[in-house]
Amino acid sequence: MSRSLNKVQLIGNLGRDPEVRSTANGSKVATLSVATSRRWKSQAGEDQEKTEWHRVILWNNRGSGLADVAERYLKKGDRIYVEGRIEYRTWEDKDGNTRYSTEIVGREMMMLSGQSGGADMEPVGASVGEAPSAKSDPQSFGDFPEALDEEDDDLPF
């Protein structure tokens, strides 16, 4: 049996407030701009950092309400966890130019900044089927920043 997997997991910060709109059929969709950064030391021992920007799409579908959660609770600077799939789109703009877009279509989302605006890093669950105010484990990635460092990876592969 041949199977494939298209799964993306991101932990990052919002670069701006969510953009929320409704489609022609009444579905709500939120677009997020999420920044992830990685740090490393160059061969000369200098600290280096690179930030990547990700376009994340959250829909209200199949009972998830993720777009509603984003609209109500998220704002610029908030730290979030998003899990979903990557999609590539191609279209022609009004001038006939071919345009390309890479998006993460979110299936689950967790707010890591808490309700107070980012200082306490207490996760607030907002994944599919979970109430936005439900508290999860009080420990978060903020308590263990080394868990996110790629440079400390000692795996043999």
Image (cartoon, grey):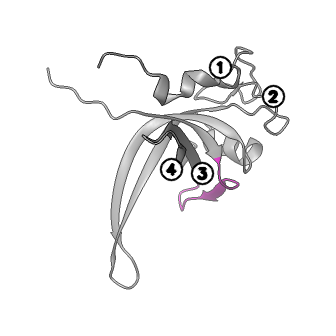
The label shown at residue 109 is none
- Quadrant occupied by the C terminus: top left
* Secondary structure found at label 1: loop
* Residue at x 76% of width, y 45% of height: 72
Q: Name the residue under label 4.
A: 54
Foreground residue, 129 or 48? 48
Which numbered disc flags the more N-terminal residue, 4 or 2?
Answer: 4
Q: Give the range drawn in magenta.
A: 14-28
CA distance for labels 4 and 2: 24 Å
* Secondary structure found at label 4: strand
- Mark 4, mark 1: which one is toward the viewer? 1
Q: In which quarter of the image is residue 89?
A: bottom left
Which numbered disc flags the more N-terminal residue, 4 or 3?
Answer: 3
Q: Name the residue under label 3.
A: 32
- Mark 4, mark 3: which one is toward the viewer? 4
- Mark 3, mark 1: which one is toward the viewer? 1
Q: Position of residue 60 (x, y in %)?
A: 58, 43
Q: What residue type is labelled 1?
A: Phe
Q: Name the residue under label 2.
A: 120
Q: Are marks 4 and 1 in contact (CB under 8 Å)?
A: no
Q: Where is residue 35 in the image (x, y as percent from the top left)?
A: 58, 47
* Residue at x 58% of width, y 47% of height: 34
CA distance for labels 3 and 1: 25 Å
Q: Is residue 19 magenta?
A: yes
Circle 3 crowding by C-alpha within 10 Å: few under 14, some 14–19, many from 20: many
Left or right placement of residue 56 versus residue 133 in this view: left
- Mark 3, mark 2: which one is toward the viewer? 2
Which numbered disc flags the more N-terminal residue, 3 or 2?
Answer: 3
CA distance for labels 4 and 3: 8 Å
* Residue at x 60% of width, y 58% of height: 22
CA distance for labels 4 and 1: 24 Å
